[in-house]
Amino acid sequence: MNAIDRLGLRVTAMIQGPIAQLSRRVTIFQLDSDPDYAWSAILELLQETDGLSLDRHEDGTVTLRWDAATDADERIEEEEGLLRVEVAEASAPF
């Protein structure tokens, strides 16, 4: 596994975290062990992703924000300290 793959997995895990999914945003950061070329490659890939916006900060972190959910998206809600996932049922195409 190369440096871009490792960084991609870490960023993916941060994006898929329950808090990030609830708020539809996450702040990612480059570790000292992440090569600059890998960080640049991941940011370029994220920048090309539809529905995703990047806010770069002076400290080097980047906040990712994505579009609000549609009726067909899963909903993740926090209820009494537990996370609950609701999936909207799609209507039949006929």
Image (cartoon, grey):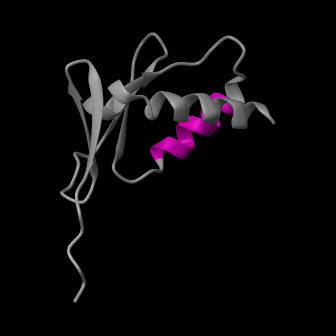
Q: Position of residue 44 (x, y in %)?
A: 55, 42
Main SS class of the magenta portion in the image: helix
Can residue 45 be found in the magenta stretch?
Answer: yes
Q: Quadrant of residue 26?
A: top left
Q: Position of residue 8 (x, y in %)?
A: 62, 35
Residue 24 visible, this angle: no
The magenta stretch is 38-47
In the depicted view, which residue is nearer to us: 44 or 9? 9
Quarter containing the C terminus: bottom left
Count of number-bearing discs: 0
In the depicted view, which residue is nearer to us: 32 or 72? 72
Q: Report the side of 83 relative to 70 (left or right).
A: right
Considering only vertical position in the picture, is 45 above or below 35?
Answer: below
Residue at the spot x=20%, y=19% of the render?
80
Can residue 17 be found in the magenta stretch?
Answer: no
Residue at the spot x=23%, y=49% of the render?
69
Quarter containing the N terminus: top right
Q: Residue furthest bottom?
A: 94
Q: Report the side of 11 relative to 76 (left or right).
A: right
Residue at the spot x=60%, y=28% of the render?
10
Q: Position of residue 18 (x, y in %)?
A: 37, 29
Residue at the spot x=68%, y=11% of the render?
32
Considering only vertical position in the picture, is 55 above or below 45?
Answer: above
Q: Position of residue 62 (x, y in %)?
A: 43, 24
